Image: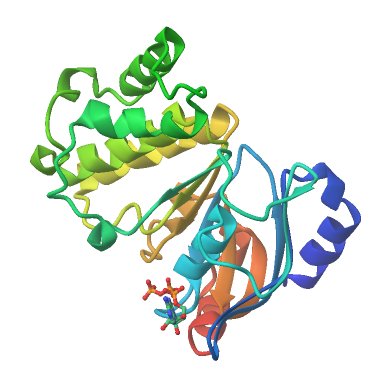
Amino acid sequence: MEASEHTCCAHHSHHHDLVITDLCVLYRKITALKDISFNTSCGNRVALVGPNGAGKSTLLKAIAGLVPKSSGHIRWRGTQIKKWSREFAYLPQREEVDWDFPVTVRGLVEMGRYPQLGMWKRFSKKDAATVDQALQALDLTELQNRQIKELSGGQQQRAFLARAIAQEAHVLLLDEPFTGLDRTSSEALGKLLNQLAQEGRLIIASHHDMSTVKNLFNKVLLVNQSSCGFGNSDELITEENLAATFTH
Ligand SMILES: Nc1ncnc2c1ncn2[C@@H]1O[C@H](COP(=O)(O)OP(=O)(O)OP(=O)(O)O)[C@@H](O)[C@H]1O
């Protein structure tokens, strides 16, 4: 199933924004990821699908430059990514966030600007305007002075996305963004991710709910340490492929 996709992409890899080739990640002696290759571009919403421990979080962190790769390449628009880059915004799993950390919504979104402050580390008018726009884009203007711990799950996800937008990242790496959201918030987040992709961003997210994956994501990487296929979600999400991925 994946062979033709890979062959095709290998020939045209220079057309893709993100090119991942033979990526391996080891934690001491544990192989978390082995020979992962796929290419994709802005405008897409890619789901990472696989069992617990398959390496989905590791893949997101490796692309974000948060865990070192053991071998292979990650190229963004023709340049090899070695460490953290403003182009990539990573949203951890909900459980990994300290929700009691005292910060307002606006303060969180402002953090998206820190990496690009000038040498005097002062907030310029442009930085403030970018934060305003990000808050507005995610419908958080009214909530900007609230503490993040006082928000609903859906609002918290939006606050993190606003931080990514303020950072002017093109790649949003989201770890289980739909987990814990009720149906209404889920649908709203789905629409929002679609819109962010259509505006020219690349969304890559781990996802557990097989009943919503085709609807929320146009592409899918089936992963179980190594790749079990990459392609259009409506073609790849079949019972047969899922069984192969989950029992690998
Ligand atoms: N910091 C770490 N040190 C050592 N091993 C790790 C570390 N983080 C993850 N692992 C191991 O790497 C493998 C991949 O883990 P990872 O969290 O990437 O999987 P996952 O697909 O995101 O799982 P889940 O769906 O349960 O979140 C697992 O075997 C895990 O135990």
Q: Position of residue 204 (x, y in %)?
A: 52, 52
Q: Residue furthest top?
A: 125
Residue beneath the point at 55% across and 26% down: 199
Q: Position of residue 142 (x, y in %)?
A: 17, 18
Look at the image and tell me in which quarter the C terminus lies.
bottom right
Residue beneath the point at 53% across and 66% down: 67
Residue beneath the point at 23% across and 18% down: 141
Q: Position of residue 80 (x, y in %)?
A: 75, 52
Residue beneath the point at 63% across and 76% down: 228
Judge left or right: residue 3 versus residue 191: right
Look at the image and tell me in which quarter the N terminus lies.
bottom right
Above or below, 214 relative to 28: above
Judge left or right: residue 182 versus residue 10: left
Judge left or right: residue 80 versus residue 106: right
- From the viewer's side, name the closer residue of 18 and 118: 118
Above or below, 78 relative to 65: above
Above or below, 203 relative to 196: below
- From the viewer's side, name the closer residue of 234 and 124: 124
Q: Quadrant of ligand 1?
A: bottom left
- From the viewer's side, name the closer residue of 215 and 194: 194
Above or below, 41 relative to 31: above
Residue 113 location, quadrant: top left
